[in-house]
Image (tube, rainbow, N blue to C red):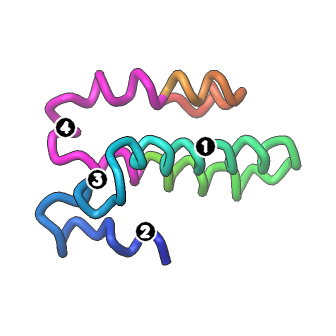
């Protein structure tokens, strides 16, 4: 599975496991797109699972996430708004 390389207990820097810089954003953004699809289909449980996975990815992929959380979450939350998922902003 694609996300197994993001096990932060196995790698010092999970972001280095991506093939190219910027793929991290695509990865969590893709999960937000999936969540938007589930929402439109009326499947709230799967929608919330996809958003939780997107958040897990953004929070483990950068080692400095906690120190720069506001900066990272600014873009994460903007995508949620763009995909009509604003009610899931934390």
Residue for point 53% across, 22% down: 78
Q: Nearer the viewer, residue 15 or 38?
A: 15
Decide which of tag 2 and tag 1 comes sooner along the chain.
Answer: 2
The residue positioned farthest toward the front in the image shown: 20
Residue 31 in picture, x, y percent from top left: 58, 50
Sequence-wise, the earlier of marks 1 and 4 is: 1
Q: Which residues are magenta?
A: 56-76
N-terminal-most mark, 2 or 4: 2
Q: Which residue is mark 1?
A: 32
Q: Nearer the viewer, mark 1 or mark 4?
A: 1
Q: Is residue 19 left or right of residue 2?
A: left
Q: Which residue is under mark 2? A: 3
Secondary structure state at the residue bearing disc 4: loop
**Among numbered discs 4 and 3, the one appearing first in the sequence:** 3
In the rendered view, would you say 67 is above or below 9? above
Circle 4 packing at 10 Å, graded few (<14), some (14-19), many (20+), is few
Residue 59 is a magenta residue: yes
Q: Mark 2 or mark 3: which is in front?
A: 2
**Coordinates of residue 42 in the picture (x, y in percent):** 86, 48
- Secondary element under disc 1, as helix, strand or loop, is helix
Residue furthest right in the image: 41
- In three-dimensional space, the C-alpha distance between marks 2 and 3, rounded to whole angstroms, equals 11 Å
Q: Note whether 32 is above or below 85 in the view shown.
A: below
Q: Earlier in the sequence, mark 2 or mark 3?
A: 2
Measured in 3D between alpha carbons, the distance from the residue under mark 1 to the one under mark 4, in whole angstroms, is: 21 Å
The label number, if any, that marks residue 66 in the structure image = 4
As helix, strand or loop, the secondary structure at mark 2 comes to helix
Residue labelled with disc 3: 60
User: Residue at 28% across / 70% down in the picture?
Assistant: 7
Q: Main secondary structure of the magenta part?
A: helix
Numbered marks: total: 4
How dense is the environment of label 2, judged by Cα within 10 Å: few (below 14), some, or many (20 and up)?
few
């Amino acid at each position: 599975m694609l996300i197994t390389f993001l096990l932060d207990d196995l790698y010092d820097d999970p972001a280095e496991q991506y093939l190219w810089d910027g793929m991290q954003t695509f990865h969590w953004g893709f999960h937000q797109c999936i969540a938007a699809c589930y929402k439109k289909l009326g499947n709230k449980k799967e929608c919330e699972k996809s958003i939780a996975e997107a958040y897990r990815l953004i929070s483990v992929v950068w080692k400095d996430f906690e120190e720069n959380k506001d900066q990272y979450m600014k873009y994460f939350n903007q995508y949620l708004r763009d995909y009509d998922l604003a009610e899931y902003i934390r």
